Amino acid sequence: MSTLKADTIVASDGTSPVTLTKQSAAKAWVNFDSTGTIAARNSLNVSSLTDNGTGDYDVNVSSSFTAVDYSINVSLYPSASWNQQPSIQNPANNTTSLFSIFSASTAGTKYDTQLVTASTHGDLA
């Protein structure tokens, strides 16, 4: 069996990053608890989280996307009760380096949750 060890992989020109083609791997993902002081439990390509108040979070990515029309998938576990149906994403706030997540009841009341997960798919800059 062979082992390949590398710190950096670049394209054959020696300077460009390797382009992922024919692959649909998530380009960024995060798992965090939004109750109290938020912090990522685990993540990929996420530089920081911003708590904008109850039920309102920004996820800042390390390597930006080429455009704001990347795909975002979010899952929330409501901590108060299951009758709260979360509103999970606010595309109006998205930039190539940040996306916003809201969690709110059907009445529009924002709330923090024990578990927030998000993953993104799109082309990185």
Image (cartoon, rainbow, N blue to C red):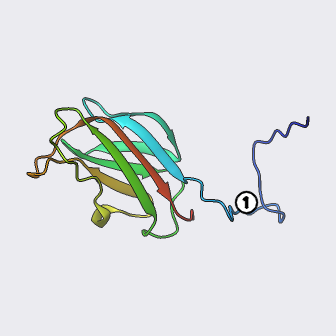
Query: Toward the viewer: 31 or 52?
Result: 31
Q: Residue at x 51, y 63 (%)?
A: 65
Residue 98 in the image: x percent, y percent? 39, 56
Above or below: residue 101 compared with residue 95 = above
Residue 16 in the image: x percent, y percent? 73, 63
Query: Toward the viewer: 3 or 40?
Result: 3
State which quadrant residue 89 falls in: bottom left
Q: Residue at x 37, y 50 (%)?
A: 74
Above or below: residue 6 compared with residue 89 = above
Q: Residue at x 53, y 47 (%)?
A: 45
Local crowd size for mark 1, using a 10 Å CA cut-off: few (<14), some (14–19), many (≥20):
few
Is residue 60 in view from this perspective?
yes
State which quadrant residue 17 falls in: bottom right
Q: Secondary structure at mark 1?
A: loop
Residue 63 in the image: x percent, y percent? 54, 55
User: Is residue 59 found left or right of 106 in the rendered image?
Assistant: right
User: Is residue 8 found left or right of 116 in the rendered image?
Assistant: right
The C terminus sits in image quarter: bottom right
Residue 47 in the image: x percent, y percent? 47, 44
Q: Which residue is mark 1?
A: 18
**Figure disc tally:** 1
Q: Residue furthest left?
A: 107
User: Is residue 116 found left or right of 69 in the rendered image?
Assistant: left
The N terminus sits in image quarter: top right
Q: Residue at x 17, y 48 (%)?
A: 104
